[in-house]
Amino acid sequence: TGSGIIHSEMPAMKEGKLHGFQLWVNMPAKLKMSKPEYIYIDADKMSVHKDDNKTIKVIAGKFENAEGPVKGHNVEPVYFDVELNKDKEFNFKLPSTHNSFIYLVNGEIEVGNIEHENVKDSTLILLTRGEDLTVKAKSNAKFLLISGKPINEEIARGGPFVMNTKAEILQAVQDYHNDTFVK
């Protein structure tokens, strides 16, 4: 969050494979140039809910007794990493004020009464506003559930920069090239 971070982190590979997901949050205009923040969360610091049907790593928000380490953010995020066993259901009450999506990593799921088949390069499923979410696994499935309160501001982007206007993008690029961009 904040004004931006020049980063070069690289997660560790396991058995020659690497699978990662980075989520960047668009801040409101009044906070865009604040001190940047980057959060790396070790797996052993993650709160986990586990039962016979599913395993949920809670990164932000709360699922039953598991609460994520990311707190106090202006968009009030919900961020779950869900592994759901075949023919089992995941139910969650989403905040009605939030925009939400599911990123299907693998498997096949049904959201409400709509089936989403596995595709090679994964699938992003935008959810309509509402509170009651039901996901059923048609096969063993892994997905991310991400939800946040919209900031309701214009968005302009250029290269790695996200601002509110094209003029702010041009200024950010100039500041970056002049080495005066807040880091």
Image: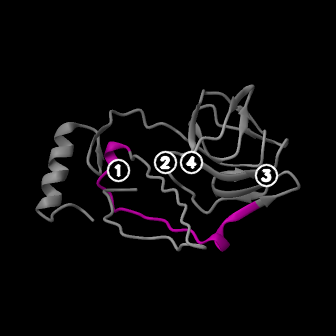
Where disc 2 sits, the SS reads loop
Mark 4–mark 1 Cα distance, whole angstroms, equals 17 Å
Label 3 vs 1, first from the N-terminus: 1
The colour mode here is: one colour
Q: Amino acid at mark 4?
A: Pro
The residue nearer to you, when weighing 91 against 98, is 91
Disc 1 crowd, CA 10 A, few/some/many (<14, 14-19, 20+): some
Disc 4 crowd, CA 10 A, few/some/many (<14, 14-19, 20+): many
Q: Amino acid at mark 3?
A: Glu
Where disc 1 sits, the SS reads helix
Does the segment drawn in magenta span residue 38? Answer: yes
**Span of residues in magenta:** 28-48
The residue nearer to you, when weighing 79 against 9, is 9
Judge depth for marks 3 and 1 and give the one in front: 3
In the image, residue 76 above or below residue 178: above
Residue shown at the point (66%, 66%) measured from the top left: 46
Magenta: main secondary structure: loop
Reading the image, the residue beneath label 3 is 64
The answer to the question of whether label 2 and label 1 lie on touching residues, with beta carbons closer than 8 A, is yes
Where disc 3 sits, the SS reads loop
Reading the image, the residue beneath label 4 is 77
Task: Give the x, y percent position of residue 99.
Answer: 55, 35
Label 2 vs 3, first from the N-terminus: 3
